[in-house]
Amino acid sequence: MKSLRLTMPLLALLFVCCKQEENNPSHSVEVIEFKEEDSSIAGFIEGQGSESNFDPAADITFFKQTQFFATPQHELSDNKNAIYCPTLALAWHQIGKTLDKPIVVSDTYPNLQELNNYNGYKGSLKDSEYQTAVEIITNTFEIKASAKFTKLLPFSEPMEVYTSLFPFKGKNVEAFYVWGGHGEYRVNIVDYKNDNDFMVRLNPKDRNHEILLWMPEEKPQSLQNAIEQATEMVETRKMFKPTLSDAWRYKFTEEDQLVIPKIYFNLKSNYPDITNNKFTLTGQTELYNVEEVYQRISFQLDENGAIVESEAEIVATTEEMEPGEKIVPKKMLINKPFLLLLKRRDSKNPYLAVWIENTELLVKK
């Protein structure tokens, strides 16, 4: 890791408006002169300036066991990783906000309609933690929107590199680890049923944010289900006081160990299921076509912490134990499918959700 940072998706959508009338009032709303040579949006589309700490982004089509989700409402595949980041929704909904007109998508385009109706991105980040921009080009009837953010989530102190072999579903991957005990504030146990079903929180230096890792025995049906179950456990834990006989389950003691596989990816997608979808603006007759969609997601998690950065664009033309209670040392090895969430502590909506099903996104030995 050259520097500690999380890089989330870069998303660009290019729409072309099929002009249906001479004067389109929507083009008079917050018009911005677009100059391609110095446009931040053009830079996003070309992937400039955002990948310096990562290898060049690879096209998602080369990763047969990984998929991007525009929203987390899709079912989890039996053998694929799933990645969601809200920058696409942030860029998309910024169009309606800027033009002060709701976007209308017909049932003909269910994937775009799902994105248009999705509100789970709200509150995932504070307004000061991400940027959006919308440009309206009157002579070409184009609307261009972008959204981006970067979060650096280093630990206060690095954890330890795991030097032994660490198999994840039978394949050796690189990992890092930490032992429990007094003074270990980088890890909290949110829920522990057994060594095959538990959730932990990793605490970065910025205590407004948290990294949640949940390895369940039973796989959730969809990424949205996984997010909801995980966030519900976090909320329950805030109000829940365990019995004396169960208190050990929520303590990260000297005999407990947590081992986490390293994650690294820098991927891009063109969302063919959204490309060439059409939409209108409420009260307007122009029909807009989604010509191009581009999203990049880069992420790294290792012993130093996590890094996430996301960019998106849209262009449219037109507690104490009972005496004698037996404590079982917890050996929490995240070596089978698990959920990773990056979120603000004051929000239920994550700004990165990744379901790790296989080793395609893990650092190989």
Image (tube, rainbow, N blue to C red):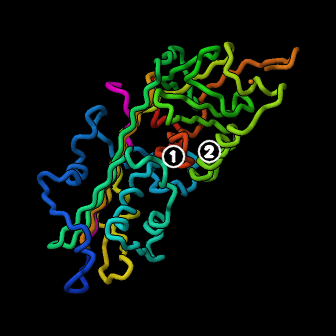
Circle 1 packing at 10 Å, graded few (<14), some (14-19), many (20+), is many
Which quarter of the rendering shows the C terminus?
top left
Q: Which structural element holds mark 2?
A: helix
For this view, does 334 lie left or right of residue 154? right
Q: Which structural element holds mark 1?
A: loop
User: Which is more toward the observer, 139 or 205?
Assistant: 205
User: Which is more toward the observer, 166 or 322?
Assistant: 322
Image: 45 above or below 202? below
Residue depicted at 37% across the width and 49% down the height: 61
Residue depicted at 29% across the width and 31% down the height: 53
Which kind of residue does numbered mark 1 sit on?
A: Pro
Residue 231 numbered mark, or none: 2
The location of residue 11, given as percent across then percent down, is 33, 53
The location of residue 318, given as percent across then percent down, is 25, 74
For this view, does 136 lie left or right of residue 92? left
**Marks 1 & 2, CB-CB < 8 Å contact:** yes
Residue on which disc 1 sits? 350
The location of residue 170, given as percent across then percent down, is 57, 29
Residue depicted at 37% across the width and 28% down the height: 4
Mark 1 or mark 2: which comes first in sequence? Answer: 2
User: Which is more toward the observer, 223 or 306?
Assistant: 306
Magenta span contains residue 119: no
